[in-house]
Structure formats: structure tokens, C-alpha cells
Amino acid sequence: MAVPARKTSKMKKRMRRGGQGGLKTPAIHLNENGVYVRNHHVASDGSYKGKQVTSK
């Protein structure tokens, strides 16, 4: 089994793990009807990509 030649310093460990955290907020935009919609989701008025897919 491989063994590291030197102890990993706190700084190296923290720099490596620094990019792992943090979640991005979902992208939200206005559709043609003026309703806020998340990407790949049906809007609250029942439209998806400019077409009516559900009845309200």
C-alpha cells in the first residue's frame, strides 16, 4: 500500500478542499408570460418552452 513520503500540511489540505464546498443557486429567468421559471421545470402557469403543457 502506498504511503506518503511527507505529512500533508494544513495549508495544502485546506487549499485542496477549498473548491469542494459551496452550492450554486438555481438559474431562474422570466418566460414570455412574465413568470419566473427554473431551467428544465414547468412554470407555475403550466407553460414549458412557450407551450401550454398543463391546465391550471
Image (cartoon, rainbow, N blue to C red):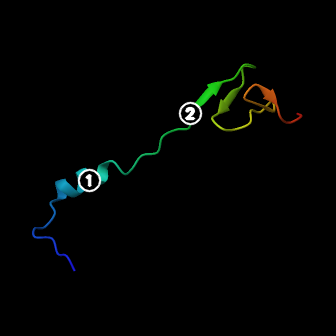
Answer few, some or many: residues within 10 Å of disc 2's Cα (few below 14, many 20 plus, some between 14 and 19). few
Q: Residue furthest bottom?
A: 1
Figure quadrant of residue 46:
top right
In this image, 25 relative to 20: left or right?
right
Amino acid type of the residue that numbered disc 1 sits on in the rendered structure: Arg
Amino acid type of the residue that numbered disc 2 sits on in the rendered structure: Ala
Residue 48 at x, y = what percent?
A: 75, 32
Q: Residue furthest left?
A: 6
SS at mark 2 in the image? loop
In this image, 44 relative to 25: left or right?
right
Q: CA distance from mark 1 to mark 2?
A: 27 Å
Which residue is denoted by mark 1 in the rendering? 16
Residue 41, compared with residue 20, is above or below; it is above
SS at mark 1 in the image? helix
Residue 26: image tag:
none
Which residue is denoted by mark 2 in the rendering? 27
Q: Residue at x 30, y 49 (%)?
A: 18
Q: Residue at x 85, y 36 (%)?
A: 54
